Amino acid sequence: MERYSPEVCEDLLKAEYSYPDIAPRSWRNQETESEKVRLFVDMDGTLAMWHPTKKLEELYEEGYFKNLEPYEEVVEAIRQIFTFEPNVEVFILSAYLSDSPYALNEKNEWLDKYLPEIDKDHRCFCHCGTDKSAAVPEGIKETDVLLDDYTMNLNDWCPPGVGIKLLNGINDTHKSWQGERISRLQPPTEIARAIMDNIDIAIDKDEGVDL
């Protein structure tokens, strides 16, 4: 995936996508809005293509996480939201192997390459096997949205937050998640729109709107 400067990326996005032409909901037009809505995005299996391994030791090899291929449609959708939705604060929320000498650094290197827009202050990491909510600043709010490929993480998130399952082609075999689903094969703009629709639903519920 070729990388461009932030300025060039913004110009390309404005030229190529119609996403900014979507009529914004009223809450996004409020100049007095003081608190952004937060979107948390998982990495492995959501932004990055997860490669099943025959041996656990492979996960501990140098380069494993850094060399994971991106789900380009999902990465681009998150970039669109970051660029065109100023009232949405985008975070990474990912678990890592705490006993690996490479995992955490390589996850940051991966983000530096594919989503450098998301700075270090918006990258939340927790140890594998722990509840992701522990890594969420100030805890999970009712308007917080999580995009993740793993049902257990989504169940831990909801309630109070809102969960969206990313279908990546190898998960959802048991149809255990009853909430919203988005396929990684959708065009980036459709993925971004679907995420924003769920953010709107979370805002409406928080404000007590009868849906």
Image (cartoon, helix red, strand yellow):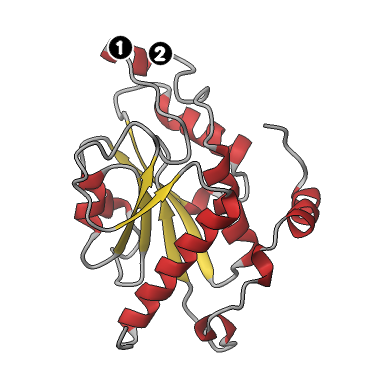
Relative to 95, is 1 on the left or the right?
right
Q: Mark 2 highlights which residue?
A: 61
The secondary element bearing badge 1 is classed as helix
In the rendered view of the protein, which quadrant contains the C terminus?
bottom left
- Specify the amino acid type for callout 1: Glu
Q: Nearer the viewer, residue 41 or 149?
A: 149
Q: Nearer the viewer, residue 205 or 109?
A: 205
Q: Residue at x 60, y 38 (%)?
A: 114
- Asked if one can make out residue 184 in the rendered structure from this viewpoint, the answer is yes
Residue 57, disc? 1
Q: Residue at x 62, y 35 (%)?
A: 113
Examine the rendered structure and indicate whether residue 112 appears above or below residue 146. Answer: above
Q: Nearer the viewer, residue 182 or 10?
A: 182
Q: Nearer the viewer, residue 44 or 173?
A: 173
Confirm or deny contact between disc 2 and disc 1 (CB under 8 A): yes
Q: How far is mark 2 from mark 1, CA to CA?
A: 7 Å
